[in-house]
Structure formats: structure tokens, C-alpha cells
Image (cartoon, coloured by chain):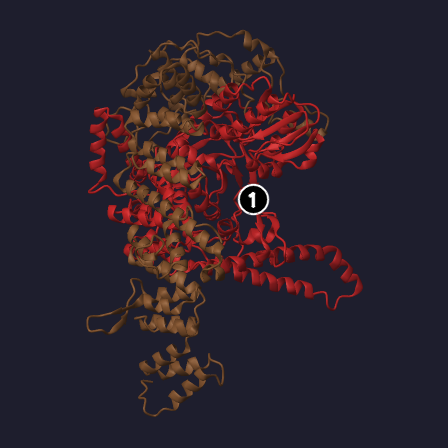
Amino acid sequence: MAHSVRRDAPELPDFSLLKRLARDQLIFLLEQLPGMKDLFIESDLMSPLDRIANVTTLKEHEVDKLYKVEYKSIVSTSDQLCFLIRPRIKTVKWICDVVNADKAIGKFRRYKVIFCPQKFYACENLLEEQGVIGDLTTDEWSFYLLPLDDDIISLELPEFFRDNFLEGDQRWVRTAGSALHLLHTLYGPFSKVYGIGRCSKMAYESWREQVKEGEQRPRQADIGNVFLIDRDVDLVTPLCSQVVYEGLVDDIFRIKCGCVEFGPDVTSSDKSIKVMLNSQDKVFNEIRNEHFSQVFGFLSQKARNLQTAYDTRSGMDIQQMKTFVSEKLKGLKQEHRLLSLHIGASESMMKKKTKQDFQDMLKTEHSLLEGFEIRECISYIEEHINRQASMLESMRLLCLLSLTENGLLPKDYRSLKAQYLQSYGVDHLLTFSNLKQLGLLVEQQPGETLTVMESRVGKLVNDKTAGKLTDAFSSLAKKSNFRALSKRLNLVPKSDEEYDLRVPRDMAYIFSGAYVPLSCKLIEQALERDGWTGLEEVTRMINGQEFVVTGSNGSDTRVKSDAQQIILVMFLGGCTYSEISALRFLGREKGYKFVVVTTAITNSARLLESMLDRHA
Amino acid sequence: MMRGKPDEDEYWNSSKFKAFTFDDEDDDFTKLKESKRAVNSIRSLVEDEDDEDDVEKVNWSGEPVGSISWSVKETASSIRSTGEARDLSFPKIDTAPSLPKNSSGYSLSSLFKGKAKPGSFQSFSDSFSDQSLRNYAPELRKPKSEYKDYVSDWTPKETVKRMQHGKAYSLEKFRSLQDKLLLLDEAVDAHDGNVITAVLIYLKKSLCKDILFRELISREIALRHYVHYLKEMEEHKLLVELFRSLGRSEDMALMHYRDHLNIKDENKRRDFLKDCLRQPFSPDDASHVQDHYTLLERQIIIEANDKKLENSGQADIFKKYPRKASILNMPIITTLYYSCFYHYGEAEGTFSSPANIRKTFRLSDKQFLLTCLGARAKLKAWFDVDALFTSKNWLGYTKKRSPIGFHRIVDILHKNNAPVQVLQEYVNLVDDTEQKISLAQKYKCHDVVINTYRDLKDRQQLVVYRGKVDRGSPEDRKIEDLLSNTQIRWKN
């Protein structure tokens, strides 16, 4: 099962450096507030913080007690408070309340707010308005990049997707540019940048500005090529059910910062355990990229091997036994532990998926991707909604239907929306409005063709009626053109061919051979063509704002060829584990090594949850 | 700063990192010169661009950019006229918003704004590159000298740059409307949402809202930042005004509707929803909001009655199945389920009756059946389940009908732990023989399997199936009887 690695694939650079940088800067910032202090940490910064430092590190730098930010009044008795937060208005408001409550009772404390990865003017303005500047000082912890594994780096900014693509707020563009700049400084200089998507283009510009302003010491490049891609270039892929082991684990148990919590049903004991899932886990490393159907066979083979290894004990003499215990036993025990864990996880996932009729669900998904028996798909979705099955799954299927069909027929849209609201609550009106805004779930415009739309826009521009213009603009962006793209790029293999999942022949294996992820296909094509030439029609349908640029950085006149084989792919708005598996496959096939940088690891549930608006 | 541990020392001094400099301007300058020299010696790649104008033009919207590959030699000689950024090694690309191919060639913003002449900008920022470390090193105190060079005649571009770098800046001098808008457009061109919002906050403070709204109409990107900022600040009133002035009435209505989520008290919430009905929703949404109001109104009545009933201990159903939660704020379908569970058989006239809920909210047969089926099956009221499908035709014969396939019904009943006797009745109603057999096997409805094979005269399958049933069981005997029956003319 382990794929043979092509000998010419170079080694990946060591990204643990990023962790050390972040940790050292944090320590530096903590030392800026000498003396004992209590530290309040934003809840979603806790896991990232865990990956780079531990409680001892914090204690060593005079942190007394640790609290999670919970938006309640605080109980700390310390006279110095430090807040480690994301630059969010809600959190800053809470801090203002804390400070002003202290002031009201005449309590004097020193406060420090550390924004991660940067501060925003809107936050500072709020501090000013609330009259707390002077009482507190602010700082920035430029912790942009968290390596989750040898080949995955995350910005841990799940809000990037909503802020950028739904709200149209470009606050994270520069952050992305800075992250890229940091990588460029440490592992560059890059010699070529490919990109597709509006945000990618802006991030590229921001990075280029920063390169221009800064300086680059001549160094030998570790990473030669960069590929930037916007999440909204391909919204279909993250909405598909994941069936590769790592993706499936993420869909079912939710991997958080590379760590998963397995409950009693997996551990077959009464307690849950947290497990790091990365290449250090030898068992996991061998199954993470495999289609789920292949995992059982692998695990049982592994179990048999393990048994054999244990069995070698019988017939050993004392000396042999001694060697066995000191050299082999520990490894075997470790492997045994991991093996039973992943077997437990597989069983539990099997049970859960069988319960929700996963097979039928996958069948519907594949039909949608293929554009086959759409009426049957609609009635499946309808029944799913009527039976009040999972709210997010229903929404996911609706979005997939809309994306693959270029919008729903007005009649279907109205009827499905009404049934959805009846099953899950009328307040999902707000969700539907968001989904429409983003283009995830839309109504087909009657008799609409691209050319008609284009001429309409042409007229509207002269019209100067901005409201209409906005509409036209956004409805243009909404066209997903999935069917045409799929045909053009051969995303859906012919269904009459048998697909052997044991020996994947292309990236489609990550979706049981039913679909090649659009995002990864674009990457493959652009790299193969060394640019976008020949893909004009494809990029026009994506409205992709694609680009490719070559840089010249002293050293690149004789770049070592290894660096050219290492490609950093940056997903703006998140990527899924399935996509990472697909890229790993592509890398093995073509002799590349991909390093995935993403604003966050996403999946269908996270993506759709970010569209919910229920708690204003 | 932490010094001392050898590995840290090495790390700060290794080639990948620069050591920090405190307040040491000279040092910075030396480095700057060094780097300039180094960079200038590198053949640079610069796209032919003149900054100010070019950003406004949409010159390759949707065009393949694969064609734009800048080769080293071609571009080495093209040094830009502004003199800024001679040292850049990657080409600038146009990031202005673009319309699709055959659009008029104007970007949105260019339609509306007056631009200052290019060339009037000094490249001030060029001479200060003290931010090179900013992105991976702790922000240290800025050199004192930087505060001294505070001048207030920075151009919009320089101001935006300074803001991006977190340097001292001043917005007060942007007093004329034109200056304010230039500043805003400059921020938008820099693609830095943080700075765009900062400028908007300043405009919000220094412009009356009508003027600001009017100007935002033609600035889509700035507008979206403003809307998002107001959302985050929870300035709903202002947001509603903004939507109104933009003519975005549906957004305004939804914005208003959203507020009901913050109202805990159900009576206040209901009144608020009633008030909401006056909002300019789209026709479809208006009917949904009407439903929302009606639903909550009824739930309040049902809740009050049932609570009383439950507490009085008189109704058996509540004693047997105590309510787990209140029905308030539950979706329509959940309410129907509740009513099928606790109020089955009530006359259509009562609010709590299933028939009333079905009619009021225009629920389809399918919705009604699925929900009702679930509720009655949960109560193991198989007679009610049976009645759901029974219909009489005009001759008085009864017939079983269902708006959804009986194979789905079987599935639902099975999930509700229906016994085999009940299940097999519905398995029998499945039209497709193959499906019928596979369902019957799945749910162990032996009679159905055996009878179907008998009807198919499929002796072989019957023999195979015999291997799957327990020896000596009734189904085993039944198969044996059939197999020894000489009357049947088996097809195999």
C-alpha cells in the first residue's frame, strides 16, 4: 500500500523553525510586561499555542494563571493582565468592559493586549472610544504560520473564508501577503508564482510590496515555486463527502490543529483520548491518503504482521528474548497501540456512516457531479430535508446541486427553500441570504446565457445605477459553470469504467474515482503547461483572474533544481484534507513535493457553519 | 530580549535572521544601502507600469496571463519613471476589479472618481525601509527619530503606506471631500482591508452620513467594508439607514429580522416578528416571516395549555411520555411532530391539531406523512400508521397508497423499531420484486422472502435461503413444505 516514492523527489525544508520563531517572539512580548501576570487566551488560539509552547514555557516567563476568554466578568486577582487574542471587535469590546469595570471600582491594574497575528485599526479605534488607551498597551504577535505536519502549514484563520468571500472584507489580504513574505524570506527566494483568483492576485501584490520594501539576503532557495489559489475558484470540492481516511476522520471527528479527540466508542474504554495525527504516527502515515475501503484490509494485514512479530518470542532463548524486549518490544507496543486506535476509529466511522445511509448519500453526490438523474437527486434531497436529517448535510447537498447545475430552477429553489425553513427553522432565511450572496445556492435566472449577461453588464456600466451594477456583478460571479468545466478538464471519469481504488490512476481516487477535484486539476494543468496558456476558456469560465509571474532573485540564475520541484500551494480560504491527499498523489506521480499553506483546514461542515448567522 | 541559550544565539545570528537593532538609525541605513546595492546589482524585472494610472485600467480582465511572462532580458531595461521601487524583483500585476471580457473597459471605481495627477507624489516611503523585519521579528520600539520627522503633508498614497506599516500618520489634513475620497480610493487600491476600514472610520466621523452613503454607492469595495464594520460594531440602526439609502430594501428587511435572535422573551419576540411583517421583504420571504410569526404565536398558546395539562397530571400521554423540552421556537416540522405525538386525533379546529398545522403552513403530503409516521411509530401506534396509508376508492375497496415509495416507509419504520409483523406488511407493498426481496432479507421478513420465491417458482433460491434460516424454525418448516409440494411447477 505504501506508494513508492520517486527517487528524484527532493526533501522538504524544515518548517519547525516557524514554531521556534513564534515561540521566541511570544516570550519576548511576555517579557515586555515584567512581573507576575495572568494570561487570558482567546479560545481558538489555545490549540495553536499548544503546538508551539507549553504551560511551563509560559510559567517561566512569569505567567501566573491561565484563563480562556469567555466574555464574562473576570475573577483574577493579579495586578497585571495580559490578553492574547485575535483582532476581533467582540473580544476587544469585552476587554474594554473588563478595564472599565475595574476602573469603576477603583481597581488599578496594568493591561496588555497582544493581537495575533496583527492588530486592526477598528480594534484600536474601539479601545480609544472606550477610553481605555493609556490604561492598556497593545502589541502584535506575528504568529502567521503554524506547521501542522511536514507538508502542511496553516494560518489558523478560519474566518478568512467568510470575511473575504462573503463579507467582501479584505482585512486578511495583507496577512496572507505577510505570511508569504515570511516563507519567502526563510525558504525562498521564489522564482515563479502562479495564481488564480482575485484574492490570490491581491495577496501576491501585497507580498511583492513587502519584498520590495524589505531585503532578501542572498540564499539558496529551498522552495522554488508558489501557487496561489482562491477557495471560491472551486467550491464544489470542499462540499463533497470525504472518503480518504484523513478527510473522513476530519469530517466525523473534526481534527483540530492536527489533533483529534477519539471518544469512548473508538477507544473502547470509558475515556476519550487526544491523538496527534501526523507523519510521526507510522500507522496513520500509511493510511491517511488511502481510500477508506482500502484501510480495513491494510489494518488487518498490519495486525497479522504484528501478531507474527510477537510470536517470534516463542522459541527464543534468554539472550534473544532480552534483545527482543530491549529492541523490539517498545516499537511493537507503540505500533499495537496505534493500530488498535485506528481500527477503533475505522469501526466507529463505519457504524456512523452506515446509520446515515452513507451509500445513498454518495450515490446522490456522484449523480450530481455527473449531472445524471437530477430529478432523483432532488427528491432524495427533499426527503432528507423532510425527515429533518442533519441540517448541514441538507444544506451541503442543496449547495452541491446549485453549484453543479448552475443554480436551481426557480420552482425548485422556492420549494426546497420553503421545506428547508419548515424543517430547520425560519431564521435560516439569513443563511439562504448568505448562501446566495456567496453564490453557493442560487436561483437560475430565466433564459440566462453568459453572452446575454455580459451585454447586460456592458449596458449597466454606462447606466451608473450602482445597485443594479452590484447585482449584475455578483450574479456574474455566481455562475459556477461546473458542468462545462468538468467536461473541459475531464473532471468526471466515465462511469462505465471500473475504477480500481487499490491502484489509483488519477486524483479522482480521493472521491472513489467519481471526480477529480477541480482545485487540484487546475494546479496540475498550470504546472504542466508552465502557465495558463491553453486554459483560456477554463479560466474565463472561472472568472479566475489567473496570473503567472517569474521573478529574478540573484540566486535563481543557478537555482538548484531541487527547489524547483518543491511547490508551495497556498489556499486562500481553506483547503480540505482530501485536496492535500490529491496533491500528495500528484506529487508522487510527477516527482514534485507539495507544501500546502492554507488559511485553515476546512471541510463541508466548517465551510457551511461559517455561513450561519443565527446568533447575531 | 532573551539571550544566553546558545541555540537561540545561533538562531538570531544565523544567516536567516537579522539581529535586532534598537533605536539605531545608522545601522538601518547601512543595511539599507547594502541591500540597495545588492538589489541593484541584480537584474530586476519590472513590468512596464506607471503606477497611478495603470491601476485604474482594466487591461486584462479575463485574459490569459500565461502570455505575460516577463523574461529577464526584455525587462531589464525598463525602469520605471516614478523612480520608486527599482529594486523589485517580481512584476506588479493589475489587481483592480475587472468586469468580464467585452465590458466597457472601465473599472467600477474609475467611473466615479477624480484622480490626482501622477507624479505629484514624492516617493517618501522609499527612503525608509525600516520595516523589513516587521514580519517575523517582534515589533520593537520605533526609532525616536521617526517621530521627529512627523510631517502632515503626506499624500494619500504615502499616508496609506504609513498606515500599512503601523507608522505614525495623520488623517486630519484630509478635509475636503475630494481629499477624503482620494484617500479612500488609495486605501482600496492597496487591497488592505484594515486600512480601508480605518479610513472609513475617519470618514464616518468627519462626514455627515448622507454624503458618506452617497459616495459609497459608487465604491463597491469600500461599501462592503463599511457594511461589515457596522455589522461587527452592531450599529444596526445606521446599517438599516445605509441599506435604505442604497435602495437595498431586502437587505434592510433581513437586517431588521435578524434582531429577533437577540430577544429572549417569547412574547416580545412574537411582537417583534409581527412588527417585522411591515418590512419590505421579497414576496417569498414575506410569507416565510409571516409563517414564523404565526408559528410562534401558536406555540405560545400550545405551550401554555400543555404545561398546564402536564402539571395537572390528568393527561395520560404526558404522564407516559413527559415532555423533554418546550415547543417554543422549534421549527414547523418539529411542531407538527409534537402535535402528532401529543395531540393526535384532535379536531382540525384546534390550533394544536396536526391537521390544523398542516393546513396553516401548507405542508405537502410527503412532509405530513413522513413526520406523522415518525411520531406514531415512536409511540408504536401501528394502527395509526396503518391508517395513514389506507384510502378507499369509490367502490369502497381499501387500498394502500403512499406519496413516497414503500421501501422508504419500511426503512423509517425499521429505524423506529417496528416489529417484523408490521415491517413485512409494508415490505409486501414494495412493487419492485428484487427490491422487495432484498428488503425482506435485510429485515428478516422470512414470510415475504419465501412467498416471493414461491410465486416466482424459484426453487433454487428457496433452497439457498433455507440455508440462512434456523433449523427447525417455522420458516424452515415452511420452506420444507413448499419444496416437497408436488403441485408447484418449479421453473428450476
Closer to the camera, A245 or A545? A245
Q: Residue furthest bottom?
A: B486
Residue B279 position, x and y percent, is 30, 34
Above or below residue B400? Residue B374 is: above
Mark 1 residue element: loop
Q: Does residue B137 appear in this view?
A: no
Relative to the observer, which residue lies in front, B79 or A143?
A: A143
Q: Residue at x 37, y 70 (%)?
A: B383
Q: State which quadrant residue A209 falls in.
A: top left
Q: How many marks?
A: 1
What percent of the width, then of the height, locates residue B372? 36, 60
- Residue depicted at 35% across the width and 41% down the height: A429
Name the spot of residue B321 as percent of width and height, x first.
Answer: 48, 60
Identity, as a three-letter code, of the amino acid under mark 1: Gly
- In this picture, residue B247 sits left or right of residue B81: left
Does residue A39 appear in the picture of this structure?
yes
In the rendered image of this protein, which colour is used for chain A?
red
Q: Within 10 Å of the Cα at label 1, are there few (<14), some (14-19), or many (20+) other Cα atoms? A: many
In which quarter of the view is residue B91 placed?
top left
In the rendered picture, chain B carries what hue?
Answer: brown
Considering only vertical position in the picture, is B224 above or below B319?
above
Q: Quadrant of the C terminus of chain A?
A: top left
Chain under disc 1: A
Image: B310 above or below B468: above
Residue A569 is situated, as x and y percent measured from the top left of the image, at 46, 38
Q: Describe residue B139's horizontal placement relative to residue B287 as left or right.
A: right
Per the image, the residue denoted by label 1 is A258
Q: Give the farthest residue toward the right.
A: A318
